[in-house]
Amino acid sequence: MLKGFTGARLACGCRLTFREGVEGSPVTVIVSEKAPTCAIPLHVSNLPVYDYREAMRPPTRFLSIGEEGFEEEG
């Protein structure tokens, strides 16, 4: 699943490692080393970086099922 990638370095200087993901996510990205000059508070050493994109998270509300036999008036 990881296709040979084991790590990366971000523009802020932090180092990342990639691990096999858990249920619902194929890859877990972990900040292995935070750079001393990094000003991003979300980068914490040895903690995963979470993906907040809508496509990757479960829905927060359920969509109602369309009613049968509904017709427009007029």
Image: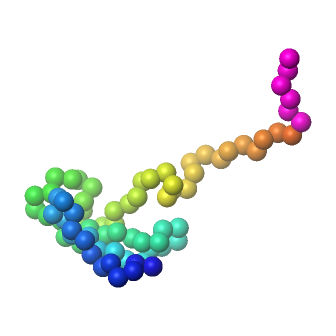
Compared with residue 1, is residue 14 higher up or lower down, i.e. above or below?
A: above
> Is residue 28 left or right of 65 when viewed as pictured?
left
Can the viewer see residue 54? yes
Say above or below: 60 vs 9: above
Identify the residue at horizontal 19%, vertical 65% (top origin): 14
Between residue 10 and residue 57, name the one nearer to us.
10
Which percent across, then down, holds residue 25? 48, 68
Give the position of the C terminus as an image quadrant.
top right
Give residue 7's position: percent from left, percent from top: 27, 75
- The number of callouts visible is 0
What is the magenta range? 69-74
Residue 6 located left or right of residue 24: left
Q: Nearer the viewer, residue 48 or 71?
A: 71
- Residue lying at the far bottom of the rendered structure: 4
Q: How is the image coloured?
A: rainbow
Q: Is residue 61 above or below residue 48?
A: above
Q: Which residue sits at x=34%, y=74%?
A: 18
Q: The N terminus appears in which quarter of the rendering?
A: bottom left
34 horizontally vs 55: left or right: left
Q: Position of residue 21 (x, y in %)?
A: 44, 74
Asked if one can make out residue 46 in the rendered structure from this viewpoint, the answer is no
Q: Mainly helix, strand or loop, the magenta region? A: loop
Q: Is residue 33 left or right of residue 29?
A: left
Residue 9, given in percent of the width and then of the height, sits at 21, 68
